[in-house]
Image: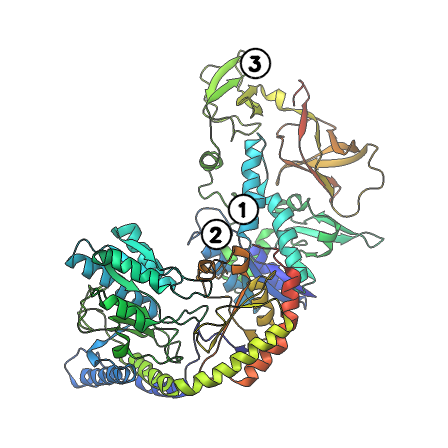
Amino acid sequence: MKILAAMSGGVDSAVAAARAVEAGHEVVGVHLALSRMPGTLRTGSRGCCTIEDSMDAQRAANKIGIPFYVWDFSERFKQDVVDDFIAEYSAGRTPNPCMRCNERIKFAALLEKALALGFDALCTGHYASIEQDEKGNLELHRSLAMAKDQSYVLGVLNEQQIKHSFFPLGKAANKEDIRREATERGLSVANKPDSYDICFIPEGDTRDWLSDKIELTPGLIVDTDGEQVAVHDGALGYTVGQRKGLNIGRPAKDGKPRYVLEIRPKENVVVVGPEQALVISELSGRKFSWCGKAPANVSDWFDAEVQVRAHGESHPCKVMVSENQMVIRPISPFRGISPGQTAVIYLGSRVLGQTTIDKTVSAVMEQV
Amino acid sequence: MPVYLDHAATSPIRPSVLERYTRTLAQIGNPASVHSFGQSSRQLLEEAREQIARNLDCDRNEVVFTSGGTESDNLAVKGLYWQRHAEDRNRTLIISSSAEHAAVLDSVNWLVSEQGAEAYFVAMDENGVLDLEDLERVLRERADQVALISLMWANNEIGVVHPIKKITELASNYEIPVHSDAIAALGHIPVNFKESGLSAMTITGHKLGSPVGVGALILSRKQKVTAVLHGGGQERNLRSGTPDAAAADAFALAVEEAVTEQATLAVSHAKLSARLIAGVKLCAPDVKVSSENVERLSNNVHFRFPGCLGDSLLFLMDLNGVSISTGSACAAGVSSPSHVVLSLGADADEAMGTMRITLGHNSTEADIDAFLEAFPKAHEGAKKAGLTRR
């Protein structure tokens, strides 16, 4: 096959590209320039946005012996990921920009370009595995290396995208093996630190970064009875479930800590309350997709598991599609869900689909 | 063997230059040393200076060796600005153009943002031809504020040639020094320093077939300039640092060969370019050829393809063994919309759909054959990938 290897400058994508070459494919490396004004040197734990990262990717491609190019997707990235991130926060939601990047840049704009330019597939260093069922349908599965499993952020892929994806690290047992392999292959990125933060937020402080982009107006922090407990300097940028940084002087009546339960952007109000109010018994989203073939009968409740953050645990649940919404009911209600986040549905190790959460229902109180 | 059609980025070293350079690299001695080794190196350096002076028609003392085009442009623009501004504090205006090479443009912009200078960019038409009436007007109105004029002899991206002689004549009415980056012009059109009326002229070796890392600023002996680099006082106290005698010698040979063969090469390049343009038009009738009907370099062909990304074209041509460019190369390896094409009034999409082919001393008919063979499929693929852009 003719394969385009997306190379971030990190160790995983470098080893993935090397494995694709070894598997006998014709491979070309490409680094995505996602910023018009890239920094010179990498700082902290951000990955893939600096000239240093681009050079790291190039050096890896040289070592592997494949042609290498830098493609500029900065305009698309700004529109589809950065502006979306700002708009989501402005609407009081908590978005996952890595998911948007996979959905709209890597496995959309980049994959489309690759196919148009004559490639058969896109290779990345994601820890996830593509399998075939007995009928030959392609399925996306969790990686063997559970600690590094990245199937969650790939939950947005559809059948066509899976068909043209190639994840050579899906069967890796753990990250250490990949680093060892990189060392053996003489790749200089073998010991490069993992990236964790959002790549376009230089200092890692989301609220501080947002404060330049969104006009923050001071407003009220209220409790669930609507009573004022404090003031904030701008409702946007708070995250549901957040406890720190609320600066509420006096303790709650029950003496227990308070958490952000809800952000009301129109009223510029942040609602806080006890931890148990964060426990969610139902969540739903209008924007949903199936990862591979859709299940046969989705208008009836079926058993699945739901995961709501990249490296979070999964929870047994019931799922159905009703009135063009994916509705998910955890068997045991759990906390830590905020509108804007993505709920990924699993059947065992298989990724079944996903929805961006619009609405949550608190187990103890009615909440929008 | 891939075909190389990007001589404006850098041109292969000439066999004669390579042979001489590998010999002179063994030469021992700092040209500033007094002993016999030093004297031998000094001789090599000074003979190189004289060889360049002969071929560009300037005084030997007017050749200031530098590390290349960027350094020469920085020395000319900043050095002239500082000197002229020090002589008269009213002189803060720099006249240039928005289609200059980054080495000039960014030096001007730095002087504006950090040193209180003001820039005036001469108007151009959609072919990149400078509006000399605009230049004349600004000189008439503001001559006493002008520190310098810096306008390139020929544009490195789109190949348009500027009337340097006319520009220096206009400036001479007000005794304003003119600098010109002549890198793209040298070897492709006649370049004569004395006749040009320039005060300063940038040239570099590696576009002519010398090693990379050596160039010169040809600086009129009448023109004072403030140094950028300070140290041992070499090169008329304008460019401190141990001179690279072997590189200067190789550079001088490349200049001589380029100047000697210029007229013959221009004829053969014009033929190759015409074939290339005809072949591309046949396959892509909607193509625009930049600055097609104005005075331009015969070794430069610059296309704009509607609905295509230049980097897709480059990629597909490269995979098929033909190396071309989208415009000028950039540090991060990203093809940005060309500032030159944007300055001609093109929109961002048009500025992203560019392809530049530049010929050099060893370009042949076979190179054009290879290009025309690879092009139709690359164009088709790039068109399909369209503007799924950025």
Residue tagged 2: A36
Chain letter for the residue marked with disc 2 in the picture: A
Nearest the viewer among B84 and B28 is B84
Q: Position of residue A302 (x, y in %)?
A: 81, 34
Where is residue A38? Give x, y as percent: 45, 52
Q: Is residue A165 above or below residue B276?
A: above
Q: Nearer the viewer, residue B276 or A57?
A: B276
Disc 1 designates what residue?
A78
Quick check: can you spot residue B390? yes
Q: Secondary structure at mark 2?
A: loop
Label annotation for residue A268: none
CA gap, disc 3 and disc 1: 38 Å
Q: Earlier in the sequence, mark 3 or mark 2?
A: 2
Front-most of residues B181 and A87: B181
Q: Secondary structure at mark 1?
A: helix
Name the amino acid, label 3.
Gly
Give the side of residue B241 with respect to residue B191, left or right.
Answer: left
